[in-house]
Image: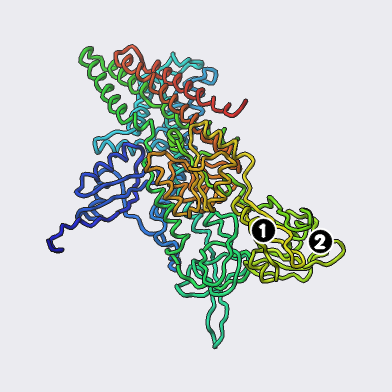
């Protein structure tokens, strides 16, 4: 067979959409089904991000896809690449998820005034209707007037969604809310208009009248509260990308040829092009990825790699944008700019991981997919049955309204918001932030937790842990000599050694070599001593002989996961100063607690294997559960690998390098002592820096989820019992309203038990 005869597969392309108007899981399912009916089209719709990723293998056009969504009853538009300015290529294409989401993120702002109005009017409505002592002659007319704006203007989003769904012969929770609220209000208004004197007396118990204005108002207010909290969570989803991209340098000092000489010119960092040479002084951020062409220094790469120890760089070494030059002056040639940089690629990783999350199927929505149409059918059948059997219009309408009122999801509306508010409020007291109700579902099935080492299991800061004596001096003198010369250096390792030797003598004749070490004269025991501290090559340059015995001691320290610095006095080695990123005091106990919760802890780090294994041994993580030398891209792949093996993965981290992995994980947990981007990419945030809070956060989330499920059970239990009773005419709307109120009280009381979490 010739190559011309080989079958060719149709080209595949990805179309990304922003979709507005979806309110629940059934909306997601409807859009996916409609798009799936197009030839060669597969769609994944994300409800929290109001987006869809559509894979097209056929000849369907982008406009066909948009038109299909419109025909389903929702609005859609193709995503546009983000570009904050015409000279900002670094941002172009890095945020396919949140570009339009951020611009139309006024959803919460639109709900806020409706919620405030509903709450302010509902309080007096509920008090007057349910507290006889608060009533006055003809109080029903005031309650009617106060309820009207609540069930019309405040509840408009529910009515609008119900109308759109009805146009497509579909129903959601909005349908039941709209019908229930409308029925309760119209029935009450009908009763009041039919008998204007029904509330002419004050001090009426609920059993003395057939008005249910408070039912309609309370339903709208609490469901608006839940919708508002959800909208807030959606808006925050885009901040991870914004925080990540803002970490890059804003300016660069570029070398330009002018009048036959080279001058330094300040330019915006996003205007750099391939081949530009720019200067980076100590303390400045490296503007973009490149290669060192002149100078030597130590670069703090912790923002990108998570490594606690700065990396020494010299000529021809590769450096990464957004990392920090800590010591010497560098001249760097730009090799990757704009969307090619490591930082921009990390931005895309976060975006892709977030957009790839499965749609959140809330429990209430799943139940309502069956519950709503059944209730509507029962209400209609009840009305028709009573008319056929009795011919009594009032009895038929009363029975049908009783079905709708008792089915009206007041307790259902309370089930999630009250538990979430109470649980998240208690969590805030304990320093735990829960992003939203979808997080609680994620904690239920998590069986594996991946822990970033630096800053999560460890402190993230180098500290002197040991001094190996190799000469005739004692520990105090060796450390004092090293601290004296290192105190004059700005290198982070030098600063850690100086901090471990307070009160060290002054140094004179100081000199240093970037990436090598330091040298100076220090007074010791009444005489001047020439002290050399640094790496092996630096000692050799200064005529210090390192014996095989000395090298064995160095190897032992390195095998133990330490960074070791030589110290020599007057040409002879006197010791090694060992530094480590120390393990947090609470980490071992926290990992034991995580195991008790049924989680398998895995240590993930960019550090070398020796360091990682030593830390794992200290905190009780099995050697086979250590993944070392992992770069940011590798962290995301490690999470994916675990997920592909069937694990439900939680990830705990604190650095920018963890942001994409936090977003990819089924449950992302950020340590509050870390970076904003890690916190924004996570589902749970612990505001302290202790792993024990991570275990506590998972436990609180699981208990809150159990509370919500219990609430939902009771919210539907009385429906299951009450609906057939109401349909048979044994339950008038007044009693139905009382049953619904009792269910609501039960749900609230159950939620308030969460306030005792963590006490005693």
Q: Residue 454: in sight, yes or no?
A: yes
Residue in the image at 55% along x and 46% along y: 613
| Quadrant location of the N terminus in the rendered image | bottom left
Crowding around mark 1 (Cα neighbors within 10 Å: few <14, some 14 to 19, many 20+) is few
Residue on which disc 2 sits: 505
Q: Which residue extends farthest front?
A: 548
Q: Is residue 141 above or below residue 586?
A: above
Residue visible at 22% across and 19% down?
384
Q: How many marks?
A: 2
Where is residue 365 drawn, in percent x and y? 36, 33
- Going from N to C along the chain, the mark reached first, 2 or 1, is 2
Badge 2: few (under 14), some or many (20 or more) residues near its Cα, within 10 Å?
some
For residue 549, the mark is 1
Residue occupying the point 50% across, 70% down: 291
Residue 191 picture location, percent across and down: 37, 20
* 494 to the left or right of 32: right
Left or right of 613? Residue 187 is left
Q: Nearer the viewer, residue 643 or 613?
A: 613
Q: Nearest the camera: 348 or 134?
A: 348
């Amino acid at each position: 067979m010739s190559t011309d005869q080989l079958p060719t597969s149709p080209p595949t392309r990805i179309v990304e959409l922003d979709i507005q108007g979806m309110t629940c899981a059934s909306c997601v399912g409807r859009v996916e089904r409609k798009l799936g009916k197009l030839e060669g089209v597969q769609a994944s719709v994300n409800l929290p991000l109001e987006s869809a990723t559509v894979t097209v293998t056929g000849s369907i056009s982008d406009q066909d896809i948009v038109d299909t969504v419109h025909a389903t009853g929702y609005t859609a538009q193709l995503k546009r690449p983000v570009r904050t300015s015409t000279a900002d290529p670094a941002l172009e294409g890095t945020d396919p998820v949140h570009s339009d989401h951020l611009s139309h993120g006024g959803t919460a702002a639109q709900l806020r005034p409706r919620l405030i109005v509903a709450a302010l009017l509902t309080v007096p409505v509920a008090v007057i209707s349910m507290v006889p002592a608060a009533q006055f002659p003809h109080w029903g007319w005031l309650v009617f007037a106060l309820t009207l704006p609540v069930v019309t203007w405040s509840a408009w989003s529910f009515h609008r969604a119900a109308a759109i769904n009805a146009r497509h012969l579909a129903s959601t929770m909005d349908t039941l809310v709209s019908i229930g609220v409308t029925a309760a209000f119209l029935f009450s208004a009908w009763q009041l208009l039919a008998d204007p004197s029904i509330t002419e007396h004050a001090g009426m118990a609920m059993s003395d009248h057939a008005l249910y204005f408070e039912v309609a108002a309370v339903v709208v207010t609490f469901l608006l509260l839940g919708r508002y909290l959800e909208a807030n969570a959606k808006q925050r989803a885009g901040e991870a990308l914004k925080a990540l991209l803002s970490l890059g340098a804003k300016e660069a000092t570029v070398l330009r040829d002018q009048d036959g000489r080279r001058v330094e010119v300040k330019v915006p960092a996003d205007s750099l092009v391939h081949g530009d040479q720019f200067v980076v002084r100590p303390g400045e951020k490296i503007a973009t990825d490149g290669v060192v062409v002149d100078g030597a220094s130590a670069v703090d790469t912790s923002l990108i790699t998570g490594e606690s120890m700065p990396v020494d760089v010299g000529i021809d070494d590769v450096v990464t944008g957004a990392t920090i030059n800590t010591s010497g002056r560098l001249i760097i040639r730009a090799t990757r700019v704009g969307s090619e940089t490591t930082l921009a690629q990390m931005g895309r990783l976060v975006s892709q991981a977030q957009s790839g999350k499965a749609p959140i199927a809330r429990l209430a929505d799943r139940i309502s997919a069956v519950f709503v149409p059944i209730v509507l059918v029962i209400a209609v059948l009840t009305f028709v049955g009573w008319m056929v059997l009795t011919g009594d219009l009032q009895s038929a309408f009363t029975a049908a309204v009783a079905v709708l009122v008792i089915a009206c999801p007041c307790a259902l509306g309370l089930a999630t918001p009250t538990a979430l508010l109470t649980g998240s409020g208690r969590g805030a007291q304990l320093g735990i932030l829960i992003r939203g109700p979808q997080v609680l579902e994620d904690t239920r099935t998590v069986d594996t937790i991946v822990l970033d080492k630096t800053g999560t299991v460890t402190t993230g800061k180098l500290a002197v842990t040991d001094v190996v004596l190799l000469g005739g001096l004692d520990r105090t003198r060796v450390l004092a000599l090293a601290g004296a010369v290192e105190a004059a250096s700005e290198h982070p390792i030098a600063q850690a050694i100086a901090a471990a030797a307070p009160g060290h003598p002054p140094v004179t004749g100081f000199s240093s070599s970037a990436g090598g070490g330091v040298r100076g004269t220090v007074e010791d025991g009444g005489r001047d001593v020439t002290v050399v501290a640094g790496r092996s090559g630096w000692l050799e340059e200064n005529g210090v002989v390192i014996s095989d015995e000395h090298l064995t001691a160095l190897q032992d320290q390195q095998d133990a996961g330490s960074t070791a610095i030589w110290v020599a006095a007057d040409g002879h080695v006197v010791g090694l100063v060992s530094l480590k990123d120390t393990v947090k005091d609470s980490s071992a106990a926290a990992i034991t607690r995580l195991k008790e919760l049924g989680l398998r802890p895995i240590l993930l780090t960019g550090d070398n294997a020796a360091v990682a294994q030593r830390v794992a041994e200290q905190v009780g993580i099995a050697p086979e559960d250590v993944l070392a030398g992992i770069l940011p891209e590798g962290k995301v792949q490690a999470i994916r690998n675990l997920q592909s093996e069937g694990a439900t993965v939680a990830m705990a981290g604190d650095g920018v390098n963890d942001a994409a992995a936090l977003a990819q994980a089924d449950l992302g947990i950020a340590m509050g002592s870390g970076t904003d981007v890690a916190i924004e990419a996570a589902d749970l945030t612990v505001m302290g820096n202790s792993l024990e809070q991570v275990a506590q956060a998972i436990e609180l989330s699981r208990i809150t989820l159990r509370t919500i499920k219990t609430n939902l059970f009771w919210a539907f239990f009385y429906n299951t019992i009450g609906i057939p009773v109401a349909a048979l005419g044994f339950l008038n709307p007044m009693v139905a309203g009382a049953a619904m109120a009792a269910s609501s009280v039960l749900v609230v009381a159950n939620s308030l038990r969460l306030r005792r979490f963590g006490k005693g």
